[in-house]
Amino acid sequence: DLLLSNSCIPFLGSTEGLDFRTLLLDEERGRLLIGAKDHIFLLNLVDLNKNVKKIYWPAAKEKVELCKLAGKDAHTECANFIRVLQPYNRTHVYVCGTGAFHPLCGYIELG
């Protein structure tokens, strides 16, 4: 209904099947951060598809192989699913992912 009434703008990146899990809304700067499978997106709130920035952050290959050897599904479990997007300060966001069952965290500079 929203699409038919032209009252929304779909995010075209969602067609990649990236399993979106976590969001961080930065109203002050007009941005939305989305955590997904192996990716972090930074979107403009005015136009979600304009100047999309994407960080590719996969799990280490050896961690993916260990995950598969443990009997986990390679496509649905053995990846770096972004679970935490937390403001750290005015310039950085703290981010954590599953890392194929070997969690990893870091900071993203929002320049």
Image: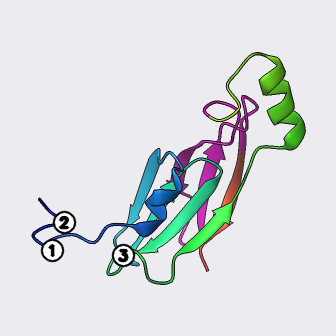
Q: Residue at x 75, y 16 (%)?
A: 71
- Quarter of the image with the N terminus is bottom left
- Considering the image in quadrants, where does the C terminus appear? bottom right
What is the distance, in whole Å, between disc 2 and disc 1 at their CAs? 5 Å
Residue 71 sits above or below residue 99 on the image = above
Q: Nearer the viewer, residue 39 or 76?
A: 76
Characterize the local packing of mark 1: few (<14), some (14-19) or many (20 or more) Cα atoms within 10 angstroms.
few
| Eye-nearest disc, 1 or 3 | 1
Name which of mark 1 and mark 3 comes first in the sequence: 1
Rendered residue at 35%/75% (across/down)? 45
Residue 75, horizontal then vertical, whole percent: 65, 35
Q: Which residue is mark 3?
A: 28
Which quadrant of the view contains residue 5?
Answer: bottom left
Front-most of residues 24 and 49: 49
The residue pinned by badge 2 equals 3
Task: Please provide the residue range marked out in magenta.
Answer: 76-104
Residue displayed at 79% across by 16% down: 70
- The residue type indicated by label 3 comes to Glu
Looking at the image, is mark 3 or mark 2 nearer the viewer? 2
Amino acid identity at mark 1: Asn
Marks 2,1: beta carbons within 8 A: yes
Say few, some or many: other residues with alpha carbon within 10 Å of mark 2 (under 14 / 14 to 19 / 20 or more): few
Label 1, on which residue? 6
Residue 62 forms part of the magenta stretch? no
Q: Is residue 91 visible?
A: no
Give the amino acid at mark 2.
Answer: Leu
